[in-house]
Amino acid sequence: MKHKETTLTKTLAIILNYLDGNLEPDSNVVNYQTANDLKEKLDLTLPDEGVALEALIPIVESYLNYSVRTGSTQFFNLLFSGSSIPGIIAEMVTSATNTTMHTYDVAPVATLMEIELIKKLTSLVGFKEAEGLMVTGGSNANLIGMLCGRHQVLPEAKLQGLGNNQLVAFVSDQAHYSYLKAANLLGIGIKNLVKVKSGVDGKMIPAALEAAIQQSLSEEKTPFFVGATAGTTVLGAFDPLPTLAEITRKYGLWLHVDAAWGGPVLFSEKHQHLLAGSELVDSFTWDGHKLMGVPLICSAILVKQKGLLSEACSGGGTDYLFHDDENDLYNLGTKSLQCGRRVDALKLWLCWKYYGKKGYDQLVNHLFDLANYATEYIRRCDNLELIAEPQFLNICFRYIPKDEPLDATGLDQLNLDIRNRLFHSGTAFVNYAHYQGLVMIRLILANPELQKTDLETFFHNLLNAGKLVESVKG
Amino acid sequence: MKHKETTLTKTLAIILNYLDGNLEPDSNVVNYQTANDLKEKLDLTLPDEGVALEALIPIVESYLNYSVRTGSTQFFNLLFSGSSIPGIIAEMVTSATNTTMHTYDVAPVATLMEIELIKKLTSLVGFKEAEGLMVTGGSNANLIGMLCGRHQVLPEAKLQGLGNNQLVAFVSDQAHYSYLKAANLLGIGIKNLVKVKSGVDGKMIPAALEAAIQQSLSEEKTPFFVGATAGTTVLGAFDPLPTLAEITRKYGLWLHVDAAWGGPVLFSEKHQHLLAGSELVDSFTWDGHKLMGVPLICSAILVKQKGLLSEACSGGGTDYLFHDDENDLYNLGTKSLQCGRRVDALKLWLCWKYYGKKGYDQLVNHLFDLANYATEYIRRCDNLELIAEPQFLNICFRYIPKDEPLDATGLDQLNLDIRNRLFHSGTAFVNYAHYQGLVMIRLILANPELQKTDLETFFHNLLNAGKLVESVKG
């Protein structure tokens, strides 16, 4: 018992120290090692004989030493950054009270918290009599959205299978790849997921959608689902929901929106217009682990038509778990594709309590301000070129040499080299993407601790790396 | 910063106190409240204005106060119990280093740990050149097993959809309900999941399986998948894998085994015979969160044929995340149905390091010994009746009044009342199930701290509850 207390206390001290390091200017964002090097440095083999509890401490220390500091203000790589203290508190409690969410009886408080969260989220979206559930990720929520759409158009598929129906789904060419996986899983087939053209702004073109729907009808197929995106992964584009909703209503299709990245704009009075028309969709993917300071995974699927989620997802009777009783309404497992389901509600609930709706409003506005600042910085700098007009918290740009112009391939390679130099040296972790045939750097602003000076540091380091790479090549 | 340290330290102190309470004889397993009562007791509404970090402490205290003590030695309700200290340490670190498992670059150590774990698990199962991945639960692993089977028989479905193929899958009538959900999701249809009869021991009857396969062939359908179970949820039965494998080989079907509950018998030299033939299956569901002291969720899918998992699951190209580079082999996201994927490897790795293979061997043997003890106790007691011969850690029995015999309905109700009285009073949390038309109590032994005296306490309380319920009714 003493060992338990000492080891947990020591772990917490190490973690506190690690977290402080995230904001220290001289901490590297990563102590980069190739997989082969890291395998030599760490002994990760698992023993026959166990070890003492205290022997886990040096392992935790190595783990932290080689982990990526996602909470560093020089981490711009993914659509999330670090985690908040309420999130960490929640995960400590969640692991110590380890339970599953399938029935109220084994997770009473977490169940009520999840119900409250779903109520709040559906109300933000503008749904009235809706239902929803926390699921295993944004990809999973998109899958369930498509499943609900399939169930609406072909309810008999649940029992009989798809039969010879050629269902067709539509997403933009900028949509997340989880839609492809969903089309595969659901038996629809990836070729029956039509990628509708987007404009230069990355938004789905409604006329192209309608043409694609008519094309599939003319081929005697069954269009059933449009998967819109609010905040695409590369450009941060928001598809025009009101126009898409008119089209889906006209043809009787299910309209889902993947707002895993963009959803939290609904907190901001200033920026919620980006998600105008959210109340018109049939289902909605929400990620708490992206802009809300909640550790992964924290996702929800929200469905406007009450009852449909349970109908589409339930597998049919099992009575060893679900007993009709006075708490039956609260047995969330009946809506779920999972049996054992982790408590993800406590962490979102505690974060929300801590920040409040207003705190999230401020956070979103703060990040938008930084996005403007970064954009202006790029515009002012001769060595940097904006690739697309930023619409959200994704800033896509590239480095351009001032003196000696490079051809397209050379420019791509130069930007790759700069990005890798920043990453491998631990100076900054930013991602790149291919867009319209060229390589660009994708700067994502998701860290609530981020300040203008951090952006200045980033650009300063990037410009230096650019000069260095140029000089090596020159 | 000071607040952060104080609040996290206070949280840890509260958690340590809570954990100590799990093993105190006078702690109730639950402070039971109906959902309506609990809603009145707790204010779970979410505010517009945030609160101070310290204000989360009383919320954590209420959360713990109304949580079910799954780590109590009177918690026999589900196929897991509590969580271990290494598991809690891991979750603290995981939340503080919050990252995703899709590429090596953002989760270097966790990726190598996951690869090591998969190697260990596949070797326990007896696979040679296998692959595997940590997934979002046992249900999800069963789904992926069925997806691999579908991909093997009908690889064109990934791109083209199922078309007019009538795929048929087979499980026993004791199998987990996740197979139903998988048949729905994959477009196969629940009616095309044939429930093969099991014997009184709860094991699938091979002759019945073969008859069912032949029946589906005679209907010109396409049998493709057998989902066996190692450790059924109700009786803890293990399907006879060697015989099933002969049949699936004969007809060219995919053989999956759901060993979410039974898998860890492979650690035990004494009991691994229950999973004899595990190396003959094509895919295998492993849950770390059931018998290994790992907090939920910790599951893996293991696939014998290398390459098939990635082929069946990948959605097709996305280059904003997966860049061909020197670490490409280590980018586990290419095998996954998820994009953002939580680090579940650290907790299983740390638990394994702590217990060692031998520790798990001892744990499994210890729980089997207790299962024997409970069985003998029931046999010796006039008021208790064993419903099925225990094969694993599930003890199914019921209370029988000694003096005044009851009819079937009365006996069912009496057992329900006893179970609910134990639960609502917080004395013990044990589940019940319907089996062969009667209600029985299902005692699950999964807590590593469990001792014979705890079982004596449980039976003592159950017998008292029985007498009390009888006297109230009498």
Image: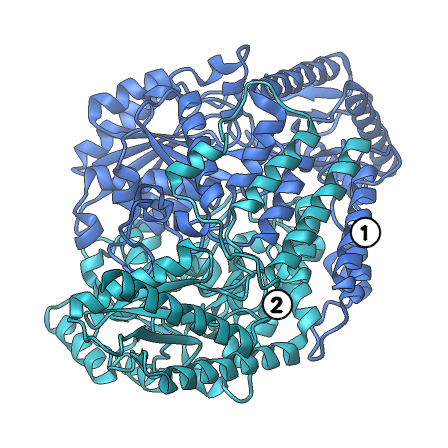
Chain colours: A blue, B cyan
Question: Label 2: few (<14), some or many (≥20) within 10 Å?
Answer: many
Residue A405 locus on image (x, y percent):
76, 25
Residue highlighted by disc 2:
B117
Q: Determine the CA span between mark 1 and mark 2.
A: 21 Å
Question: Label 1: few (<14), some or many (≥20) within 10 Å?
Answer: some
Residue B158 visible (yes or no): yes
Residue A172 locus on image (x, y percent):
41, 30
Marks 1 & 2, CB-CB < 8 Å contact: no
* Nearest to the observer: residue A91 or residue B467: B467
Q: Residue at x 54, y 79 (%)?
A: B452
Kind of residue sitting beneath label 2? Leu
Chain holding disc 2: B
User: SS for tag 1?
Assistant: helix
Kind of residue sitting beneath label 1? Asn
Q: Residue at x 38, y 81 (%)?
A: B378
Direction from residue A227 to residue A348 in the image, left or right: right
Residue B329 visible (yes or no): no
Direction from residue A278 to residue B202 in the image, left or right: left
Identify whether B433 is placed above or below A384: below
* Nearest to the observer: residue A312 or residue B371: B371
Q: Residue at x 61, y 53 (%)?
A: A96
> Which quarter of the image is occupied by the N terminus of chain A?
bottom right
Find residue B86 and report its image quarter: bottom right
Residue highlighted by disc 1:
A65
* Nearest to the observer: residue A439 or residue A4: A4
